[in-house]
Amino acid sequence: MGARSSATRPRAVGRAAGLGLGGATLLTLLSGCSIADWGDAFGHFGWPSRGISLQAHEMYDLWIASTIAALVVGFGVWGLIFWCVIRYRKRGDELPVQTRFNMPMEILYTVTPVLIVAVLFYYTAIVQTNVDRLSKNPDQVVEVVAFKWNWQFNYRDGMGEKANTVASTVGSSDVIPILVLPVGEKIRFEETSRDVIHSFWVPEMLFKRDVFPGNVRNVFEVTLDKEGRYVGRCAELCGTYHAFMNFELVTVSSGEFDQYIAARKAGQSTQQALVAIGKEPYATETSPFNTRRQANTWNQPETVAVGK
């Protein structure tokens, strides 16, 4: 027994050293790159990008970190499987001992999954809480009104249904509605629908929320941190022209936004106010759907004669 123990002890020490070295190497590699670097290197692991809001950054980091953790666990499991296949492959007709067990290993593969799930749950709960958090005094309040098949954006002077609209933008079959918002400010969205369920979605925000008819007003807040133009969409199947229910989000600096709102309050249209702050007056990332309506036809090719 003593000889056997002395012979196996170097093997155990060697395996532990190998695992420790592998873990240290993995930690070194992970610490040398940020979450964003890993996301960029591997195509964001299926997500569009890091996002354009503070909330989107948190969700993105959680996604990338969770994916890396899952890959580490996966490669570890696959490595152990192939190691067992090679190390303990059949060498004869003698049946191996069926009652042998390793108590430390039993505890390890029972406790480790529980710890992994607990850690993932902890960070998921934190990020979800931050994404759903509402401030007492948001900097801007926008009422989102959805209808078949377009959008209306009302800039409000307060929260709730009793607040007043100071400026409004309504889309049509000919003009894509443009939602102008500032970066670096807390923006509160209050959603309502005039007919069926829609869904307010800007892919670069990595977030969407359904818009319900009736007395239900879904609310959420974001803090944008990147200027630009982004296409917004309806993400809930709402009818014939659901796929063409687009809008355009234009994020600008706080100074430009104040100038834009002042122009709207002065009676200028959305397009005139956009020109006043040096922006393109119409949507540049998407275009209206050509309904091709004629006297006695509906959505027919332009070559179809009227009345035919």
Image (cartoon, rainbow, N blue to C red):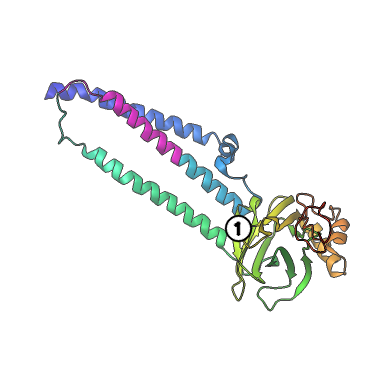
Residue at image coords 47%, 57%: 125
Q: Amino acid at mark 1?
A: Lys
Q: Residue furthest bottom?
A: 162
Which of the image's four quarters has the N terminus? top left
Q: Callout 1: 10 Å neighbours few (<14), some, many (20+)?
A: some
Q: Residue furthest left?
A: 1
As drawn, 81 above or below 62: above
Please count the marks in the image.
1
In this view, the residue in front, 297 or 8, is 297
As drawn, 209 above or below 96: below
Q: Is residue 249 visible?
A: yes
Residue 42 in magenta?
no
In this view, the residue in front, 164 or 243, is 243
* Residue 139 percent coordinates (x, y): 70, 65
Residue 75 in magenta?
yes
In this view, the residue in front, 136 or 281, is 281
Residue that mark 1 sits on:
208
Which stretch is magenta? 70-93
Residue at image coords 34%, 44%: 112
Residue at image coords 56%, 37%: 38
Determine which quarter of the picture holds residue 49.
top right
* Residue 176 percent coordinates (x, y): 78, 58
As drawn, 96 above or below 215: above
Which of the image's four quarters has the C terminus? bottom right
In this view, the residue in front, 100 or 111, is 100
Residue at image coords 16%, 34%: 98
* Residue 154 percent coordinates (x, y): 74, 68
| Left or right of residue 281: residue 30 | left
* Residue 8 percent coordinates (x, y): 21, 24
